[in-house]
Image: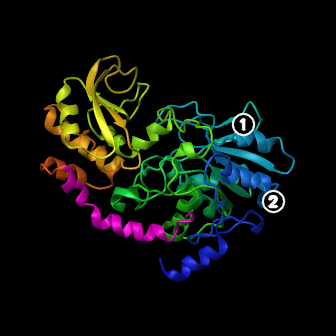
Amino acid sequence: MNVSRRVLLAAGAGVAGALGAGSGTAGAATVDGQGRGPGLRTGFERLAADGYGLLSGQKVGVVTNPTGVTRDVRHIVDVMHADDRVDLKAVFGPEHGFRGTAQAGGSEGRYDDPATGLPVYDTYLKSGQALADIFTASGVDTVVFDIQDVGARFYTYIWTLYDCMEAARLAGKRFVVLDRPNPVTGRDAYGPVLHKEFATFVGRREIAQAHGMTVTELARLFNGEYLDKPVELATVTMTGWKRRDFYDASGLPWVPPSPNMPTPDTALVYSGTCLFEGTNLSEGRGTTRPFELLGAEGIDARWAAAANELALPGVHFREAYFAPTFSKFQGKTVGGVQIHVDDREAFDPVRTGIALLVTAKSAWSGFAWRSDNWIDKLTGSTQVRTMIDKGADTDEVVQGWHGELEKFRAVRRQYLTYK
């Protein structure tokens, strides 16, 4: 990607000046200086306050899910459908569906929404021309994206964003992204960077495992670096959000973005502990603390003891026993650990996830990777798996991705909007 294209995209990505939204160049967002609670305004709040001027004269479709709500928890689709200033024609649902009725790996299919009568189209696992054809069939001119992300590369909504941007370009549609906070801050990027030969729906392009960006920043990154040709992109940034802010600083209600993401505490650990999906251990699905509880039959107190001996910053581990109600070990009592983050500023979720893999393998003889090497899809290469198998410790595994992470950080900085 050359500089001239970045400059061109920066000039064309901004929204109407009345919104004061960023154009794609670092530092362009208007931030209100308060940075806490009611001072934060989401992209949708700013769009609505401007009278939906950005959507004027357009037939609009919205890519969203249950997280697309106002701060009084009304869904933005319901709000816009009731407003004569918006010509809302369609809704596009991602994994788990528009109204969120489907579990992991599922969606709601094509139906008419009972509340609004709007046609709802299924985008899950659709991309390229097949998804472009759905946009064309819907009759919309502009596709709006508003979904709460959790900050991890393998959380599929950012790849729904990527796929929809690409499909909108193919279909000749305009694309608008409304911003929401990264709930685990945007201070920095952490973890291994995806190698392009490992691209899947849990990682389309070469970004870090914990990317430290908001969805508007990611949209600009995708448009500037990864799409074959840029889509006509507009972004509506937030005001009042600082990169250091965790979700509780936003004053916004937390709506689970997926069934196994019940709280912001889940999001805090997810970019590290989701790696256990690539093993034969339970990642806590089917419990009230998914991704905070990890375990398997035959594990005892030795794992928690080994993890605590590492003295990882900001976290302690409790010996725990639990019986998942679904997923791995359904109905069986398993042993393992519960993660307790006591200093979220110091906590590094990706490093912690690696440390837990290393100690689980050493403390439990039954440890195994999933037979399909799903761990490679999650980490983005074979590096983590092969290094752990060869006996590397946590520091050695983390050092192994240092060079590629620094390169990603350099690219990422060009698309950061908030101070």
Separation of disc 2 and disc 1 at Cα? 21 Å
- Left or right: where 414 falls relative to 122: left
Q: Is residue 357 depicted above or below 196 in this figure?
A: above
User: Where residue 217 sits: x, y (%)?
Assistant: 55, 62
User: Where residue 152 sits: x, y (%)?
Assistant: 43, 49
Residue marked by disc 2:
53
Q: Amino acid at mark 2?
A: Gly
Q: How many other residues sit within 10 Å of disc 1, few (<14), some (14-19) or many (≥20)?
A: few
Q: Is residue 298 depicted above or below 25 in this figure?
A: above
Residues 45 and 346: in front is 346
Write the start and end of the magenta stretch as one range. 394-419
Residue found at x 31% / y 44%: 374
Is residue 299 something that shows in the picture? no
Q: How many other residues sit within 10 Å of disc 2, few (<14), some (14-19) or many (≥20)?
A: some
Label 1 near label 2: C-beta < 8 Å? no
User: Where residue 14 sits: x, y (%)?
Assistant: 67, 68
Q: Main secondary structure of the magenta part?
A: helix
